[in-house]
Image (cartoon, helix red, strand yellow):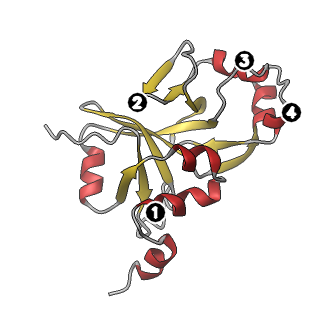
Amino acid sequence: MNELDLTNHFLIAMPAMQEGVFAGTLTYICEHNENGALGIVVNRPTSITVADMFDQISIPLHQPELEQLPVHFGGPVQTERGFVLHDTQQDWQSTLRIGKSMALTTSKDILEAMGVGKGPRHMIISLGYAGWEPGQLEHEISENTWLTVPASEHILFELPPEERLSAAMALLGIDYASLAEEAGHA
């Protein structure tokens, strides 16, 4: 069995992946083990705001600074389900710990806490996730579909979504724009 563990890494979609759901995406891997991988796309905000989402699920939102934050497209699996990628302050009912400082929570109690100002300090809220069967992600990497690099909380939580992909590429010492220009040229 391959021992590759990309938990707490970014997956950078190669420019050759110009079509499809993952074109131009930066995905944060929350879990990668013998059962497959689970990630959240972190650079694809939707037109849905946090205020819209809270209104739709009937949770009061008393935090004006959260109202206009975008809800992200997290991936093509379970797009009706919410996922909160966050720094860890506490555990909620359904929290997956990712290393020492990150977590992914899917239970409603984190949203209720956010609504009254008791949620995590940093978060990305998404609908859906990206999932891979055992060995599928490793195969895609061997086919040069993805680049990988250890994740950065600075990129996740302090940069706007449109800057995250190029910032992750910079961690590898590569300018995404120049790589995209060269893709497809012999």
C-alpha separation, residue under disc 2 versus residue under disc 3: 24 Å
- Per the image, the residue denoted by label 3 is 112
Q: Earlier in the sequence, mark 1 or mark 3?
A: 3
> What's the mark number on residue 64?
4
Q: Which residue is mark 2?
A: 99
Q: Which residue is mark 1?
A: 169
Amino acid identity at mark 2: Gly
Asked whether 125 or 156 is in front, the reply is: 156
Q: Position of residue 81 (x, y in %)?
A: 59, 29
Name the residue type under label 3.
Glu
Residue at the farthest bottom position: 186
Q: Are marks 1 and 3 in contact (CB under 8 Å)?
A: no
Element carrying mark 4: helix
Q: Residue at x 28, y 30 (%)?
A: 35
Q: Residue at x 72, y 19 (%)?
A: 118
Front disc: 1 or 3: 1
Q: Earlier in the sequence, mark 2 or mark 4?
A: 4
**Label 2 to label 1, Cα distance in Å?**
22 Å
Quarter in which the C terminus is drawn: bottom left
Do callouts 2 and 1 mark residues in contact (Cβ within 8 Å)? no
Q: Position of residue 144 (x, y in %)?
A: 30, 63
